Amino acid sequence: MSGKPTYYITTPIYYVNDNPHIGHAYTTLACDVLARFMRLDGHDVMFLTGTDEHGQKVEKAAEAAGVDPQSFCDRVSENFRILAETMNFSIDDFIRTTEPRHERSVQALWTKLVDAGQIYLDAYEGWYAVRDEAFYAEDELTTGPDGQKLAPSGAPVEWVKEPSYFFRLSAWQDGLLELYESRPDFIMPESRRNEVMSFVKSGLRDLSVSRTSFKWGVPVPGDPEHIMYVWIDALTNYITAAGYPDEDGESFKRWWPAIHMMGKDILRFHAVYWPAFLMAAGIEVPRRIFAHGWWTREGQKISKSLGNVIVPSDIVAQYGLDQVRYALLREVNFGNDGDFSHRGVVQRTNHDLANEYGNLAQRVLSMIAKNCDGQVPEHGAFTPEDQAMLGQAHGLLAAVRGHLDVQAFHLALQAIWDVIGEANRYVDVQAPWTLKKTDPARMATVLYVLAETIRHLALLTQPVMPESSARLLDQIAIPADQRDFAALGEGFALKPGTPLPKPQGVFPRYVEEEEGAA
Ligand code: ME8
């Protein structure tokens, strides 16, 4: 074991009733950036994603596809592994709820809850939405145009009447409120925390945690007519992957608790049910629960019926992988809803990446290639302006770390782009192309300061844009073992005289098809 601090980050596990779309790509991207950042920042990281394969919704989808549920799950789950490759996600583990390690874990948790007197047998009568896999109270429902009762999510509900095991959620109302009060950053962002708190304050009913009307799931230990409610099954994935039920094992002690990232639609399950299950079983609650917002496309809700679903591999093919990764995290204040528009991505690609970042690197590196024999330039004494520029580069890690610690990706990127802006101004003010004639030694110092600034920028953009940043680092000849954040600052500064490869543009402009054809 390395002795490094650990960091465990999870995505929701995705339902296999659907193919991967931008919602899945977005949640996992956010986690990927945190995982990559923490690894570079000296942590041992476990980054978990996977698929949620049980429940009535998946059973129905398999039936509609005319295959048995397991083959259906095998097929669709694979699409989420492919998504990880398409998006360059650095996942450490991919969990499927149909795996034996998971069934064993859910049954162990169930048994522990039963032994603790937290689960009892009764009968459920009420509304259920298969699409959400959620139970709703009468007063939460609305009526659709055709008289159909609808859940707050818009999902149709059906009246369910069957024997059921119940979890004593009502007994955890005070415990949950104490948890939220004592740890104000347990649920983020704050607006979501407030919503969860008022939901819990309004009163909690015991939760139905088994169903007898379908088969596709984990049977209740000792009463296999009952299938566990899919959310108790699904949420448990987070501890399974850490090594549960071996609670005293090295793995579980090492990784748990995790940070959970998800969309706002499934916050209640994570922020209310999940910590209640854990407290009831005497297991530590998660470190943080962060709910991000939802994407629309060109101002419209995204839905299959509108035919405007965004397929990650399509936008990656169209705009480029790192361009998509950057735009998704830069366009929206993380936590808020956002709109995915063609104009927005093109603006980010051409302005932020090509004109600002790419152009900075390209002009500095090509001047070095032409005027400094293609080597890291020798520098003289640094002027106050040089020191200010280097100081900005050196200060960046602390700023980015602070923002990512609260999942503020947009602010982390803003901080990096502030330094890019400063560097572009510094080039203009110092005007190395003029110094070339008047004071070549000073020109070399200026180019050195800029190359060193670019080194810092490229190291720090690695989590968001791994491939492009690697290409930039290649161009300033940074060895593989000097690409983590321990290499930031003066200790590993560029060595004058190091030969550099021929510079090449890293951030191409997006050219509209009509323009390109013209
Ligand atoms: O909910 N914009 O699975 P899922 C942003 N299996 N995010 C979106 C989105 C959009 N337009 N559409 C969907 C489940 N998402 C459960 C989770 S975890 C123990 C079990 C997000 O496949 C959504 O918020 O429906 C959620 O986080 C994920 O994508 C979809 O999850």
Image (spheres, helix red, strand yellow):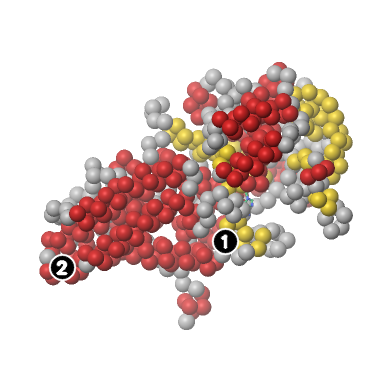
What's the amino acid at mark 1?
Phe
Q: Say if 442 sits above or below 227 in the image.
A: below
* Numbered label attached to residue 436: 2
**Is residue 456 positioned above or below 47 on the image?**
below
Does 208 sit above or below residue 413?
above
Q: Which residue is mark 1?
A: 340
Dot 2 or dot 1, earlier in sequence: 1
Which amino acid type corresponds to the residue marked 2 in the rendered image?
A: Lys
Residue 211 horizontal/vertical position (percent):
80, 34
> Does residue 228 appear anywhere in the picture?
no
Determine the residue positioned at 26% across, 61% down.
426
Residue 263's tag is none
Percent from the top left, x then y, of residue 45?
46, 36
Using the rendered view, name the quadrant where residue 503 is placed: bottom left
Camera-side residue of 141 and 490: 141
Q: Residue at x 30, y 59 (%)?
A: 423
Identify the image quadrant of residue 164.
Answer: top right
Q: What residue lies at 53% left-to-right and 26% top-to-bottom?
A: 252
